[in-house]
Image (tube, grey):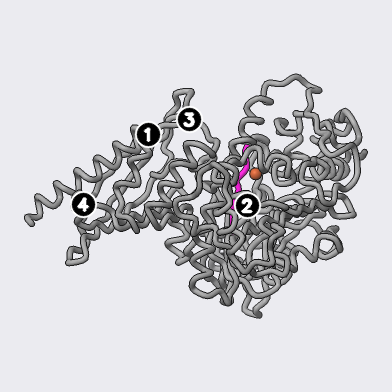
């Protein structure tokens, strides 16, 4: 495929992913992953020193759905809205088993009283594969620089 | 920084009752009380988690941390023991070590290049003899008298504790005979550090201490287990305080159908769920047996800054770092055992989903402490909380619907703050 077309398709996937989370449509979020896909968040400081402990480690679509159901029905946290800004998309490898893509993100969080703050800055390290539904995540690893999380993290970034 | 004597105005701070069941909200909001805590508790005769020895494997390995608000560096020396010092230059107070972690035999202050060894001893002062024989330090200047303030260190089964006080008893005496076996239980074989997660709460650190000594809230605030019908029939509980000041405590829960092999009670519970929902992927809760009594929860709070957690197979030391009357940082230092097999290690990483800033059964805790903080900022002098669950006195022992450990904490706190009951 033409490189420009490929970038266009990746951009469109990312735009839909960000819009889904920013609009709070959490139920649609696991659909961006293949069934045995991996979603992981890990602090930059652990990543840098080779420590494996994640903030979140969801290694199936089922676990992602459980996360969403729990957020909707079990967990207690302040109502909030995310606003993603993503940039610097680079295809770092391209082969028969899919695409490796890295990019930067910033998530601004707005709470009920109407104050916005930078909640998280980090990198996405993605492994994308072709499926009948188009490009999907086989892996999305969020390495977040903002290792000191403000209060708590409920919604995935 | 507190000015000596400034906190004496608090000597007559009024306290409503003596059993610890009514706590004036001012202790959560007053910066003057915060300063007095730093002086009497955090710089006082107490012990604090600094690191796991496994974080400092090679001579020279160091890590920056805090005891209360005091910056501390803990490091493995060339003699293979562990030392710690206050990270504040003996010259004019600059922070000497500016890294979170690293390896160094010498620590040099960037301001005027005073150099210290890994034990915090002063080893070099530029222009000590002056330049061209002019000026320089006075002839009687003795480097041995100008090292970094040392922190007392005790390593216990791979856990490194520090104290800023010469008056603190030994760690074993500080924790006492009721508490030490619980520490030994978790650290019964060599552990491996797996990394940390950190969160910042806009609330007073003692609200968190109340929370981790409060089994009453567990099934009421954290709805994850009940929502997914992961209940345990016949859960056995334990809630025990130390027999000294009463400021340390252990809470455990143990499922009773534990004649099953590892993981089976989980499947059993899932299979017997009522009309409710179950997890789409319950792999996270496949429990591996690794203790004689396989507690599902072990929350061991060591006053005033350390909580040792075992929830199923996820283990962590939680470090409480007060920043101001209204803020603290909470660091979860996760670990496993060095002999973990691949599957068990993977399970520990997965179960990290349960605890930490995003944890299924822990994210609500800082939410709750912030809800309290926000509401009490505005209260009138003399307003206080009310805790009576589990009776007025005594050690509940086996009850999980009890606030007796919180009341014990407050009695001990009052003693240390000079407001003795
Ligand atoms: S303040 Fe450290 S050398 Fe001067
Ligand atoms: Fe809790």
Q: Could you confirm whether marks 2 and 4 are on the same chain?
A: no
| Disc 4: residue Cβ within 8 A of ligand 2's nearest atom | no
Give the residue displayed 36% in from the left and 57% down from the top.
Answer: A38
Quadrant of the frame with the C terminus of chain B: top right
Give the residue displayed 44% in from the left and 56% down from the top.
Answer: A57
Q: Could you confirm whether marks 3 and 2 are on the same chain?
A: no
To which chain does the residue with label 1 belong? A
Q: Find numbered disc 3 in the image and state the secondary structure of the residue it sits on.
A: loop
* Residue B54 picture quarter: bottom right
> Residue beneath label 3, please?
A79
Foreground pick, B247 / B311: B311
To which chain does the residue with label 4 belong? A
To which chain does the residue with label 3 belong? A
Q: CA distance from mark 2 to mark 4?
A: 56 Å
> Residue beneath label 4, please?
A135
Checking the image for residue A24, the label placed there is 1
* Residue A8 higher or lower than B309, as above or below: above
Q: Is residue A66 rendered to the left or right of residue B67?
A: left
Q: CA distance from mark 4 to mark 1?
A: 22 Å
Q: CA distance from mark 3 to mark 2?
A: 43 Å
Foreground pick, B211 / A117: B211
């Amino acid at each position: 495929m033409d490189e420009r077309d490929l970038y266009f398709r990746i951009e469109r996937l990312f735009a839909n992913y960000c819009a889904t989370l920013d609009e709070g449509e959490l139920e649609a979020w696991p659909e961006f992953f293949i069934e045995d896909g991996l979603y992981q968040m890990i602090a930059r400081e652990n990543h840098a020193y080779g420590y494996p402990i994640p903030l979140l480690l969801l290694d199936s679509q089922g676990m992602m759905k459980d996360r969403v159901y729990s957020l909707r029905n079990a967990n207690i946290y302040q109502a909030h809205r995310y606003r993603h800004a993503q940039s610097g998309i680079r295809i770092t490898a391209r082969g028969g088993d899919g695409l490796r893509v890295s990019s930067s993100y910033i998530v601004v969080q707005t709470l009920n009283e109407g104050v916005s703050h930078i909640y998280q800055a980090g990198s996405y390290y993605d492994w994308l594969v072709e499926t009948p539904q188009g490009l999907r995540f086989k892996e999305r690893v969020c390495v977040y620089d903002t290792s000191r999380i403000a209060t708590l993290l409920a919604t995935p970034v | 920084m507190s000015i000596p004597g400034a906190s004496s105005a608090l000597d007559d701070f009024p306290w409503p009752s003596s059993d610890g069941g009514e706590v004036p909200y001012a202790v959560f909001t007053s910066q003057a009380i915060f300063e007095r805590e730093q002086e009497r508790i955090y710089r006082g005769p107490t012990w604090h988690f600094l690191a796991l020895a496994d974080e400092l494997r090679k001579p020279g390995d160091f890590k920056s941390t805090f005891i209360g608000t005091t910056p501390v560096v803990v490091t493995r020396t060339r003699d293979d023991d562990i030392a710690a010092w206050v990270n504040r230059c003996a010259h004019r107070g600059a922070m000497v070590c500016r890294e979170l972690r690293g390896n160094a035999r010498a620590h040099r202050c960037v301001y005027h290049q005073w150099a210290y060894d890994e034990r915090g001893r002063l080893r070099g002062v530029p222009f000590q003899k002056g330049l061209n024989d002019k000026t320089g330090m006075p002839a009687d200047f003795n480097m041995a008298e100008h090292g970094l303030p040392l922190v007392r260190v005790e390593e216990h089964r791979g856990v490194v504790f520090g104290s800023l006080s010469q008056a603190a008893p030994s760690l074993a005496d500080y924790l006492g005979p009721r508490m030490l076996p619980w520490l030994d239980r978790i650290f019964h074989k060599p552990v491996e550090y797996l990394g940390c997660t950190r969160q910042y709460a806009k609330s007073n650190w003692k609200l968190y201490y109340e929370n981790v000594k409060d089994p009453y809230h567990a099934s009421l605030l954290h709805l994850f287990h009940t929502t997914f019908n992961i209940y345990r029939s016949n859960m056995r509980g334990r809630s025990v305080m130390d027999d000294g000041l009463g400021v340390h405590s252990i809470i455990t829960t143990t499922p009773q159908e534990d004649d099953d092999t590892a993981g089976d009670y989980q499947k059993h519970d899932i299979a017997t769920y009522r009309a409710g929902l179950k997890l789409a992927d319950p792999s996270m809760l496949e429990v591996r047996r690794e203790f004689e009594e396989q507690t599902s929860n072990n929350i061991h709070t060591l006053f005033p800054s350390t909580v040792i957690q075992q929830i199923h197979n996820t283990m962590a030391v939680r470090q409480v770092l007060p920043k101001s009357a209204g803020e603290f940082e909470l660091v979860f230092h996760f670990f496993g055992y060095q002999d973990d097999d691949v599957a068990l290690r993977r399970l520990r990483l997965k179960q990290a989903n349960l605890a930490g800033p995003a944890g299924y059964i822990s994210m609500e805790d800082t939410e709750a402490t912030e809800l309290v903080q926000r509401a009490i900022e505005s209260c009138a002098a003399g307003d206080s909380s009310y805790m009576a669950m589990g009776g007025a006195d005594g050690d509940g022992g086996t009850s999980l619907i009890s606030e007796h450990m919180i009341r014990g904490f407050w009695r001990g706190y009052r003693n240390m703050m000079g407001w003795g009951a």
